[in-house]
Image (tube, rainbow, N blue to C red):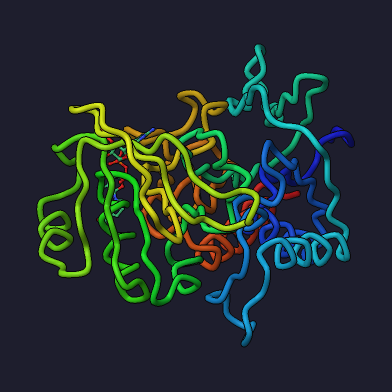
Amino acid sequence: MLDNVRNVIILGSGCSGLTAAIYAARANLKPLVIDGHEPGGQLAITTLVENFPGFREGVQGPELIDNMRKQAARFGTEYMAGHVVKLDLSQKAADGSRKPIEVNLGRETLLTRTLIIASGASARWLGLPNEEALIGHGVSSCATCDGFFFSGKEIAVIGGGDSAMEEALFLTRFAKKVTLIHRRSEFRASKIMLDRARKHEQIEFLTDTVVDDVYEVEKKEVTGLRLRNLKTGEQWDFPTSAMFLGIGHTPNASFVGDQLDRDGEGYLVPQDHVRTRAPGVFVSGDVADRRYRQAVTAAGTGCMAALEVEKYLEEIGK
Ligand code: NAP
């Protein structure tokens, strides 16, 4: 046995990866977590989280993820900054013998018997000049996380797919009015979702319209958007208290290539719960979940992946 081969490496330090680390560390597997491009994942850029069980008054996203990180460290989890450049999941050496999984970080290659891919999905943003500075202050990509803060206010939702319809419909629970702003007049959304949104009396549609900027960084809150009609070229200021993006997510899985099953949008598709077709390779959290995308579901699958790692190591006698 090579002693530079780890029992488990976890890619991603969001809610799913850290939950996997807590379980794997408590099983004495000394997991190594590779932080990735966005340490802490989406919780690290959220404000108050009110739907994570166990926090009666809610908890700040960064605080929640920091606690998970420290909790995993307490049981022996190690962390390494960096991101994966290449993976070799083949586990077959040139002479046909078994070799470990290889995780190439560019500067070095790590070896491991098992791998949990919990690299998450990144919300797409519009890339506007003031957008990033207002994330968590009225700009959000998560209606279930942040909608409540805009009770009785007017909200804009951007996008024309099912995510945007779902966000708009969900936000009517809190908002006085929701304006759905879409860059075309045709929609990607399913007919049923689109009809539901169109029929809703609190939702108004603005089509063929794009957002050129969001105000007002100085006040640390959203007060309005600069809009432009793509057909007429007309520009105007649109007062609103929040801008929710529903323009899709991108799973962070390009480094996997075709070594695992992926769907049309690149999400990893496990074969059985969190097990993949590569022995010893498991997936958890948003990188394999285009449907629920909640902190608590990501934590749940992270736990499942760690339990599968334990089982797999037993199976191969390690
Ligand atoms: P999507 O279907 O790809 O739609 C993304 C929308 O955002 C499109 O309307 C697109 O406009 C717009 N968009 C993208 N980039 C933009 C930009 N830079 N500026 C302005 N608009 C932009 O993504 P999704 O809505 O997240 O859905 C992804 C998948 O998940 C779909 O298969 C969907 O059915 C599924 N989903 C299902 C449910 C449900 O059934 N409850 C809920 C959510 C998601 P264009 O149309 O002009 O490209």
Q: In the image, ligand 1 is in what quadrant? A: top left
Visible residue check, residue 311:
no
Q: Quadrant of residue 20?
A: bottom right
Q: Give residue 208's position: percent from left, percent from top.
A: 21, 35
169 lies left or right of 111: left
Tell which of 291 and 136 is nearer to you.
136
104 lies left or right of 177: right
Q: Give residue 210's position: percent from left, percent from top.
A: 32, 36
Visible residue check, residue 74:
yes
Tell which of 227 and 82 is nearer to you.
227
Whether residue 230 is situated above or below residue 12 in the rendered picture: above
Whether residue 301 is situated above or below residue 208 in the rendered picture: below
Tell which of 92 and 16 is nearer to you.
16
Q: Quadrant of the N terminus?
A: top right
161 lies left or right of 127: left
Q: Give residue 283's position: percent from left, percent from top.
A: 54, 47
